Amino acid sequence: MLLIKIKRRLTAIYLEAVTGFLWWAVGYIPSHHARRFFYRLFGIKIGKGSTIHMMARIYDPRHITIGEDTLIGEQATLDGRKQLPNSQGGLEIGSHVDIASQVMIWTSEHDIQSNDMRPVEEKVIIEDYVFIGPRAIILPGVTLGRGAVIGAGAVVTKDVPPQAIVGGVPAVKIGERETQELNYKLGRARLFQ
């Protein structure tokens, strides 16, 4: 039991150090290529043409997967935590996904109904062609269906169907994308962001 506690504590310290290094040192490098090198070095699987803009905060990069041609805005939070026994955590982001600035994606939270506020980790899945507006918050266990649109400032607490447009707190469906043929490329990211 003591060895398990020691291992968990050392793992937590290591992941805190990685988060700090990726945010304070790597996150301020004004080069996509340099940042992508370090993100991959620490375990993020990043597809061709995908970019994470400056000052992103990344928790447990080992369990984050990003598809091709995906743009993640400045000061985004990507939570890949999957540390608990039998955890269902981790973050999976598809291809051609546009995540605006200051979006927060969480895979870990506290169980407020438990007497010890124990942590709960649930995987977040963001399918292809999703757009997430600025300062939106995606909570643990949510799946955003292909082509979904999340309005600015929305707090997403439940799955969003493909092509749905949601907004508000908590997010509710406010419309639907009319086009069924999503096949665009997001293009080149700005060089110094």
Image: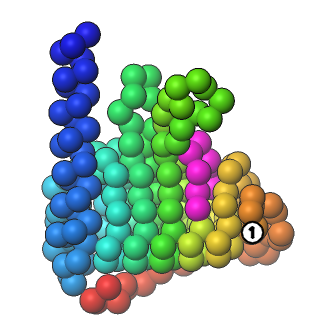
Q: Is residue 139 magenta?
A: yes
Q: Is residue 36 visible?
A: no
Q: Residue at x 60, y 75 (%)?
A: 133
Against 191, residue 15 (above or below) is above
- Read off the magenta span: 137-144
Q: Is residue 60 magenta?
A: no
Q: Nearer the viewer, residue 67 or 149?
A: 149
Report the residue at 18% width, 33% height from top.
10
Residue 137 placed where, x, y %?
58, 62
Q: Is residue 107 at least partly visible in the picture?
A: yes
Query: Which residue is most to the right?
Result: 174
Measuring from the top left, give residue 58's x and y in whole percent.
34, 58
Horizontal side of 93 relative to 29 (left or right) equals right
Label 1: few (<14), some or many (≥20) within 10 Å?
A: many
- Quadrant in the picture for the C terminus: bottom left
- Residue at which label 1 appears: 167
Residue 179 in the image: state x and y as whole percent. Answer: 74, 75
Q: Secondary structure at mark 1?
A: strand
Residue in the image at 68% along x and 51% along y: 157
What percent of the width, then of the height, locates residue 46? Answer: 31, 60
Which quarter of the figure has residue 8?
top left
Q: Is residue 159 left or right of residue 79?
A: right
Q: Residue at x 65, y 30 (%)?
A: 113
Q: Amino acid at mark 1?
A: Gly
**Residue nearest the observer in this picture, 106 or 90:** 106
Q: Quick check: 147 above or below 186?
A: above
Image quarter where the N terminus lies is top left
72 in relation to 156, above or below:
below
